[in-house]
Image: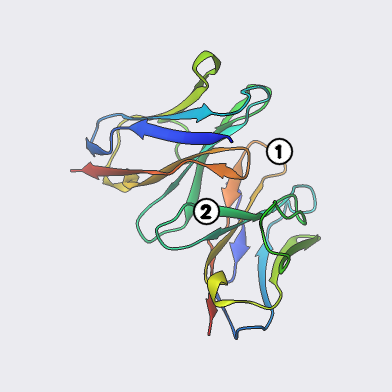
Amino acid sequence: SYELTQSPSVSVSPGQTARITCSGDALPLKYVYWYQQKSGQAPLLVIYEDTERPPGIPERFSGSSSGTVATLTISGAQLDDEGDYYCYSMDSSGNESVFGPGTKVTVL
Amino acid sequence: QVHLQQTGAGRLKSSETLSLTCSISGGSFNNFHGSWVRQAPGKGLEWIGEITHNGTINYTPSLKSRVTISVDASKSQFSLRVTSVTVADTAMYYCARGAGLWGQGTQVTVSP
């Protein structure tokens, strides 16, 4: 079955830039979506279709994708940005979707 | 404003069938795309399956033999069934419409 890979954790100081990567063989063909999840809450979509930001998501969240690697960037990270971040995409056939294992972001 | 409301039993015993329903209110059911996702305690998100805009249903390979996703457009609902549950199926289950709209989650606990 298809898999996405993410680094387990990222630490950043407030105001600095955090970058979270997601790797997958089908990423050149399929969009990536990024979710933020805080403890006890449902996931929140922060980036869709590689680069698009939903209404209400701060501009400090941005996405990019090149080849088999997609990146979520948090520019000027804030304490409120702490949480787990998951990438989501599908295999090349479009029949199987999958979440990455998640990246824990710590702002301190 | 579109809202997803999940209903269904939260406590099951091994070998029973899990049944959850996601009711959608406040929006059109046309071109509907719905997914089910679960999260075991302390673990990451796991995609279970989906029903796409054209009615195609896809499942994650590891659960395909036990999972059924269905839709009742007349009631603006879609449902999840998982047969022969075990303790390993204990998780928070979420429904989602499209990519950005999620239900509140249903904690499902399976006892031996």
Q: CA distance from mark 1 to mark 2?
A: 25 Å
Q: Chain of mark 1?
A: A
Per the image, the residue denoted by label 1 is A93
Per the image, the residue denoted by label 2 is A43
Count of numbered tags = 2
Q: Chain of mark 2?
A: A
Quarter occupied by residue A62: bottom right
Mark found first going from the N terminus, 1 or 2: 2
- Residue drawn at point x = 57 percent, y = 70 percent: A81
- The three-letter code of the residue at mark 2 reads Pro
Residue B3 in sight from this viewpoint: yes
Residue B69 in sight from this viewpoint: no
- The three-letter code of the residue at mark 1 reads Ser
Up/down of A91 relative to A39, above or below: above
Q: Nearer the viewer, mark 1 or mark 2?
A: 2
Up/down of B86 relative to B16, above or below: below
Label 1 Cα neighbours within 10 Å, binned few <14 / some 14-19 / many ≥20 = few
The residue closer to the viewer here, B47 or A13, is A13
Label 2 Cα neighbours within 10 Å, binned few <14 / some 14-19 / many ≥20 = many
Task: Say whether residue A61 is left or right of residue B22.
Answer: right
- Residue drawn at point x = 61 percent, y = 84 percent: A14
Q: Position of residue B61 (x, y in %)?
A: 51, 39
- Residue drawn at point x = 69 percent, y = 38 percent: A94
